Every structure is written in C-alpha cells, then in structure tokens.
Image (spheres, rainbow, N blue to C red):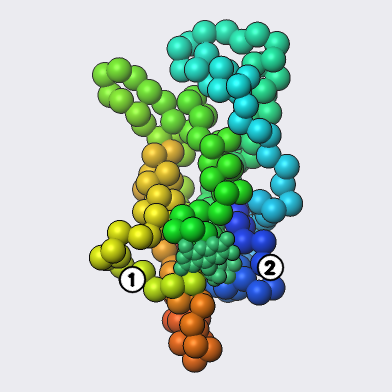
C-alpha cells in the first residue's frame, strides 16, 4: 500500500481551479489504487513554524556538522518533524495557483521549512548538492489567471519553473505537469481550458 501526499496551496477551495483539476486526478488515482492512502496537506490550515534566527542558525550548524544549543535544537526538532511527514509519502500531488507570477507565500513558506540539509538535500564540496527525495513521482497542477504557454516568451512565469527547480533540487526526477490557463477569461475559454486539464488529470491520475 502506497501513500500519496496531496499538497493544496489555494485558499479558494470550491472556487479553485487548481483544486478542481487536482481532485479529478486524485479520483482517477484512487479508482486505480483503491488500497492506497491519500493524505491531504492543506497549507491554509497548517501551522508552519517561522523560519527565524534560531532555525537558520540550526540549519547552518547542520551544514557545518556542528551541535545545537537548546533554542536551535527546539527549532530544528519542529523542522525535522515536518520533513518526516513529507518524506513518509511515496507519491506527491501539488495544486498550485499562480500568485504574482510565482507561488502563493504559504507554499514558499512550506518549501523554506522542508528544504533542509540532511533531510531533503546533502552537500559535499566534491560533488555539490544532491537531492534526497529520490525515486518518487510528483504531479503539479498549476492554475493561472492569464495564459503563459509552454515557452513563456515574455519570461513572466516564475511559478512553473520555480516549482520544478525546487522539486528537482530536493531530488524529484519524475514530475508530471497539468496547466489550467487562463482562468480569468471569457467563460467559454475557461471551460475549454478546464476540459483539457480535466482530461489530462484523469490520464495522469491513472498512471501516477
Ligand atoms: C494574490 C493573487 C495574485 C495573482 N497573481 C496572478 C499573476 O501574477 N498572474 C496570473 O496570471 N494570475 C494571477 N492571479 C490569478 C490566479 O492565478 C487565478 O485566479 C488562478 O485560477 C488561481 O488558482 P485557483 O483557482 O486554484 O485558486 C492571482 C490571484 C491572486 C489571488
């Protein structure tokens, strides 16, 4: 029995296009994998620790192979707890709105918390950085009000590339993508985009 972690980054819930498409993906996944567990991490209903001075000091202590003081240890324990929760999954689905050309701050906060040395990546002076979340597939469902296309000629899309870069940095190699765009357009254009995305969601959900 595998565990799929579904990470939800839109607060719009029943009005959210990324959630609607991700839900279709998860439904197809569950139909194909009835014994698997799907856990939802709603980032709008999750208390994340501040990434404060103690936590940053703890991070550098880890990177330098040094010990903690009491404040650093307490801060780092909470980080490791969240990292363990993330690592416990075998597969991942992210539903992500574009906000100001990039990710909602809740998802950025989450990545700042979990992308940690010894947890999600390692570093050696000889080989550089290596991701530690390996052999696990991810699917990203990206919603955007405008239409940016695949080649993004104006260089405005910092959502798709950044998400993929960060996931690659922590080790992901297989990353499926579904884009629903434009969501802020004439209703018939939105309906068309949604229909295409829902089809892709069913396909990817069935094979994830
Ligand atoms: C705070 C905020 C910032 C946004 N910034 C952008 C943007 O930079 N580019 C864009 O195309 N759409 C932008 N939008 C529109 C959303 O990307 C669009 O509504 C999308 O459908 C949101 O995903 P959701 O439907 O899953 O919530 C923004 C929306 C919000 C609320």
Above-or-below relation of 72 to 41: above
In the picture of the structure, the residue carrying the numbered disc 1 is: 149
Q: Which mark is residue 13?
A: 2
Q: Position of residue 115 (x, y in %)?
A: 50, 35
Taking the spot 56% from the left edge, 17% from the top edge, the residue there is 57
Secondary structure of the residue carrying tag 2 is: helix
Do the residues under discs 2 and 1 have CB atoms within 8 angstroms? Answer: no
Image: 40 above or below 82: below
Disc tally is: 2
**Secondary element at tag 1:** loop
Identified at 50% across, 54% down, the residue is 103
Q: Nearer the viewer, residue 135 or 147?
A: 147
In the rendered image, is residue 33 in sight?
Answer: no
Q: Which of marks 1 and 2 precedes in the sequence?
A: 2
In the figure, is residue 67 to the left or right of 39?
left
Figure check: 181 above or below 45? below
**Closest to the observer: 181 or 130?**
181
Q: Measured from the top left, where is residue 134 in percent x and y?
A: 42, 40
Residue appearing at x 25%, y 65% in the figure: 153
Rendered location of residue 106, percent (x, y): 61, 49
- Name which quarter of the figure residue 175 lies in: bottom left
Identify the disc placed on residue 54.
none
Q: Residue at x 40, y 50 (%)?
A: 162
Relative to 151, 140 lies left or right: right
C-alpha distance separating marks 2 and 1 = 25 Å
| Picture coordinates of residue 129, whole percent (x, y) | 35, 29
């Amino acid at each position: 029995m595998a565990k799929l972690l579904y990470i939800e980054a839109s607060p719009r819930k029943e009005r959210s296009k990324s959630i609607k498409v991700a839900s279709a993906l998860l439904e197809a996944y569950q139909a194909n994998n009835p014994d698997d567990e799907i856990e939802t991490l709603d980032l709008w209903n999750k208390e994340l620790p501040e990434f404060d001075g103690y936590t940053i000091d703890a991070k550098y202590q880890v990177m330098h192979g040094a010990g903690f003081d009491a404040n650093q240890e307490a801060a780092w324990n909470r980080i490791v707890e969240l990292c363990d929760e993330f690592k416990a999954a075998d597969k991942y689905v992210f539903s992500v709105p574009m906000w100001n050309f990039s990710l909602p701050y809740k998802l950025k906060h989450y990545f700042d918390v979990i992308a940690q040395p010894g947890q999600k990546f390692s570093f050696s002076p000889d080989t550089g950085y290596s991701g530690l979340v390996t052999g696990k597939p991810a699917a990203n469902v990206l919603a955007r009000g405008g239409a940016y296309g695949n080649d993004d000629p104006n260089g405005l899309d910092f959502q798709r590339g950044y998400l993929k870069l960060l996931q690659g940095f922590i080790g992901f190699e297989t990353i499926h993508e579904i884009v629903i765009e434009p969501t802020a357009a004439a209703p018939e254009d939105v309906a068309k985009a949604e229909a295409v995305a829902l089809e892709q969601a069913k396909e990817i959900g069935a094979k994830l």
